[in-house]
Amino acid sequence: MDIDSLANFADIIAIPLALIGVLLIVDQLKMAREESERDHQRRQNEMTLNAYNTVRGDLRDTIRRVRLRLHLADMFDEFTDENLKQIMNDKALRDDVAKMLGFLNKFAVGIKHDVFNIDLVNDLAGKLFIRTFKQFRPYIEEVRKDYDNFYKDFEDLVHQLEDIRYGRKDNDPLNEDLIINYTPSEEYHYPRYFWHYLLTIFKA
């Protein structure tokens, strides 16, 4: 076998070996990413549970104290104009309401920044978050007269929790917020175009 034949044979062998090497690298990267995501999920769950367990007692005591002062039987009771006046005229009560909503808003900020797990929060106290926001919405709207973004993260979280727990109807105009527009560069899917991508490289 002459030198040219050996060179051609080496070239033929090199291409599939290179392809196998690339596939192994891609597979290793995929495994590393999946492990990183699992590790992040574990840490996120731990932080969510720890934070919830830390504030749960104080939060529930504050909610119970506020509702007792306002004569609200439970989270489904109607919040009246008289309740709002009572809060605005009673500094201690208003401080308790601010503390209660502040606890919930801090969880919302943690979820917004991917510190806490929204699915776990939903399992632990999703209904509490939703009903508390709806019940005290008149007060929230009142304080927003001073600053529009009071408890905005809390409100955003409530909308997300409602999506998780109850879903949205197809004709809900809020569904427009869920539409994602993809550019052509985002339409690559592994491994659908993977071989085409490799062939393009080796043809170059």
Image: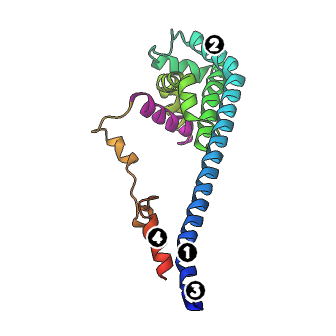
The earlier-in-sequence mark between 4 and 2 is 2
Q: What segment carries the magenta color?
A: 147-166
Q: Amino acid at mark 4?
A: Tyr
Describe the element under mark 3 as helix, strand or loop.
helix
Residue 85, percent from left and from top? 53, 20
State the quadrant of the N terminus: bottom right
What is the crowding at mark 4: few (fewer than 14 residues within 10 Å), some, or many (at least 20)? Answer: few
Q: Amino acid at mark 3?
A: Ala
Please determine whether, in this image, residue 44 is positioned above or below residue 122. Answer: below
The quadrant where residue 110 appears? top right
Instruction: Check disc 3 and report the residue beneath it.
Output: 7
Q: Amino acid at mark 1?
A: Ile
Q: State how far apart marks 4 and 3 are (Cα).
A: 25 Å
Residue 54, percent from left and from top? 72, 24
Residue displayed at 65% across by 17% down? 62
Please indicate whether residue 165 sits to the left or right of residue 14 in the image.
left
Magenta segment, principal secondary structure?
helix
Instruction: Check disc 2 and report the residue beneath it.
Output: 65
